[in-house]
């Protein structure tokens, strides 16, 4: 851990953040919103206005009898979602629900949490209400219909609401079905502690602007790309959908993106393809056959500057920082964007840690590592093997209070003040963390060897002909535990690479994929080799584009 840190303000709760930002940044835009029906029209919500709406929402919730109750928030990323989240977690406990879950599951989550109300988009409200769970249902549009003049007495009542460190103000259900999902109980103090750790290591200023891409119900997006930026006076804009990222980048000209690796990979591929088609033919092959970073380093400086300007213009012209997490990042992606002057910081975190545990930052950088433990926190490896690999455990003010109404599950992961992450990794002498996979995902062969699926998935992911892959335990013909890979082929890439290939011929496609697997197998020890290959049309994913390690994917 570097001794260098930025001197920053530490907040105890969201209310302090809202008031600090309103007083410090006042008329500056907290949110830039697209006006419906106008191609280039925007509405700006200042930090003062955001504070006024926040207090009006709190007052309204109290008047409706929601004080001390659980309130669900569900919908696409929006200013309304964000303000309702802040108010609900102040007056009672907010329950952010994934907008992609079925109406049946949403109602089940509300029932489990005993929610008295839901604030959501109109379509979602209609669908969830039909499930019959008795609660108040409110369309997000009511946010703009509120009378924002709150009496001094009511404001004093809101300011007097206690937000203890040992009480749950945010209840988040993890990925999974309603039967397998756990409810993570977080205090606002834990989230604020995580914000404090992060801003000590990564400089965010009022000049920054973000484009919100990832689902806000996840702590990754909510903590790092909403609450943290709001506390620093940065402006928040919202993506119209993953297919509109490039268009939105040009419209909003953000300086920061919080992303998952799949988005970085998509941007890198699009950029490479565009450069290869437009640069001088003698250099096109470099971009076709190598990574963006390698290609940029092997062209003449004058041409490099022209291409660099062109690429940055495609990204809006102001981009300076990518924060990437939620899955392993290929080192070349970090080098790709570094080559065009954009810093890419990868980190490691979990919902239970609100979320960040370790990360690269302004003071230290290692493209091969998930980073070092964040300021104010501790991290170590429990029960390491001969290679130094063991379970990553951590402690700090950012930890959850426990799992909702599940003491047994809480006791299994919270021990002596330490949180057992369930992730495997090792920490080198300089404090760099290297992730090796999930403890429960480890494949143990019949001869006792441990195989980390994520390592093999990363190797497969280096081939553009493979769109997605998951490595699991399979059974050989003789009943022995073997390594199995379920692979989604990138048909477009295969067609481009092998012009005579009929991509509608499943056997022909599988033959090409097996050739790639053979190539991977040549580079790894015998016991790690992939013995079973299944080419599938798709793999189920979470809303942050992570491949699910449950359900059909594991069959």
Image (cartoon, rainbow, N blue to C red):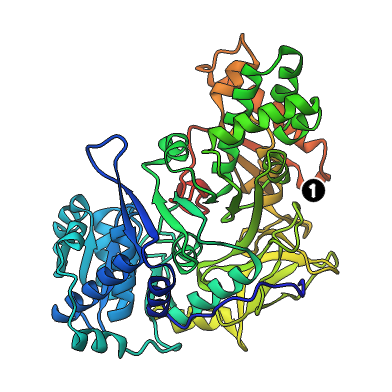
Q: Choose top left, top right, bottom left or bottom right for residue 341.
A: top right
Determine the secondary structure under disc 1: helix
Above/below status of 90 relative to 522:
below
Q: Choose top left, top right, bottom left or bottom right for residue 275.
A: top right
Instruction: Report the residue that reaches farthest toward the front.
Output: 27
Q: Residue at x 63, y 35 (%)?
A: 533
Looking at the rendered structure, the number of numbered marks drawn on it comes to: 1
Above/below status of 482 relative to 326:
above
Query: Would residue 8 appear left or right of 381 to someone viewing this image?
Result: left
Q: Residue at x 56, y 56 (%)?
A: 326
Query: Would residue 433 appear left or right of 546 to someone viewing this image?
Result: right
Above/below status of 44 relative to 476:
below
Q: Position of residue 180 (x, y in %)?
A: 41, 65
10 Å crowding of disc 1: few (<14), some (14-19), many (20+) = some
Above/below status of 328 relative to 199:
above
Q: Nearer the viewer, residue 208 or 340?
A: 208
Q: Position of residue 309 (x, y in %)?
A: 63, 32
Q: Position of residue 26 (x, y in %)?
A: 38, 67
Q: Is residue 259 shown to the viewer in this render?
A: no
Q: Nearer the viewer, residue 357 or 62?
A: 62
Residue wearing tag 1? 527
Q: Nearer the viewer, residue 5 or 282?
A: 5
Q: Choose top left, top right, bottom left or bottom right for residue 350.
A: bottom right
């Amino acid at each position: 851990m570097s001794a260098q840190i930025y001197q920053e303000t530490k907040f105890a709760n969201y209310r302090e953040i809202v008031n600090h930002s309103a007083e410090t940044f006042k008329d500056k835009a907290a949110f830039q919103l697209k006006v419906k029906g106008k191609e280039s029209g925007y509405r700006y919500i200042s930090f003062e206005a955001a504070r006024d709406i926040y207090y009006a929402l709190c007052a309204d919730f109290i008047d409706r009898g929601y004080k001390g109750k659980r309130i669900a928030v569900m919908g696409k990323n929006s200013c309304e979602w964000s303000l309702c989240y802040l108010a609900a977690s102040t007056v009672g406990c907010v329950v952010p629900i994934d907008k992609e879950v079925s109406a049946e599951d949403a109602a089940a989550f509300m029932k489990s949490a005993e929610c008295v109300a839901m604030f959501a988009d109109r379509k979602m409200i209609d669908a969830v209400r039909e499930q019959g769970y008795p609660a108040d249902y409110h369309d997000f549009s009511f946010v703009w219909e509120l009378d924002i003049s709150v009496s001094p007495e009511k404001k004093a009542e809101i300011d007097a609401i206690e937000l203890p460190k040992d009480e749950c103000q945010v209840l988040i259900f993890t990925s999974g079905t309603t039967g397998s999902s756990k409810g993570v109980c977080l205090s606002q103090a834990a989230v604020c502690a995580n914000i404090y750790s992060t801003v000590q290591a990564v400089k965010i200023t009022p000049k920054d602007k973000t484009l919100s891409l990832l689902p806000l119900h996840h702590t990754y997006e909510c903590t790092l790309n909403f609450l943290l930026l709001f506390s620093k006076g940065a402006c928040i804009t919202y993506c119209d959908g993953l297919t509109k990222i490039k268009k939105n980048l040009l419209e909003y000209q953000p300086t920061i993106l919080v992303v998952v690796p799949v988005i970085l990979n998509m941007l890198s591929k699009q950029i490479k393809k565009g450069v290869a088609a437009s640069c001088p033919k003698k250099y096109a092959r470099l971009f076709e056959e190598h990574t963006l970073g390698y290609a940029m380093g092997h062209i003449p400086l004058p041409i490099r500057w022209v291409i660099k300007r062109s690429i940055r213009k495609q990204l809006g012209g102001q981009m300076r920082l990518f924060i990437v997490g939620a899955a392993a990042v290929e080192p070349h992606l970090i080098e790709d964007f570094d080559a065009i002057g954009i810093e890419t910081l990868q980190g490691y975190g979990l919902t239970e840690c609100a979320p960040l545990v370790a990360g690269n930052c302004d003071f230290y950088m290692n493209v091969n590592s998930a980073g070092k433990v964040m300021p104010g926190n501790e991290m170590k490896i429990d029960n390491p093997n001969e290679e130094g690999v063991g379970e990553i455990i951590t402690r700090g003010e950012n930890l959850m209070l426990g799992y909702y109404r599940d003491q047994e599950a809480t006791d299994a992961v919270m021990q002596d003040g330490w949180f057992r992450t369930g992730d495997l990794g090792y920490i080198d002498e300089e404090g760099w963390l290297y992730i090796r996979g999930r403890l429960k995902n480890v494949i143990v062969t019949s001869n006792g060897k441990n195989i980390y699926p994520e390592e093999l998935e990363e190797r497969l992911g280096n081939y553009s002909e493979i769109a997605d892959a998951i490595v699991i335990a399979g059974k050989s013909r003789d009943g022995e535990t073997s390594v199995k890979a379920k692979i989604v082929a990138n048909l477009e890439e295969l067609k481009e690479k092998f012009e005579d290939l009929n991509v509608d011929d499943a056997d022909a496609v599988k033959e090409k994929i097996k050739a790639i697997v053979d190539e991977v197998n040549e580079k790894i020890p015998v016991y790690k080799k992939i013995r079973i290959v299944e080419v599938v049309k798709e793999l189920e994913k979470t809303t942050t584009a992570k491949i699910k390690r449950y359900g059909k994917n594991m069959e």
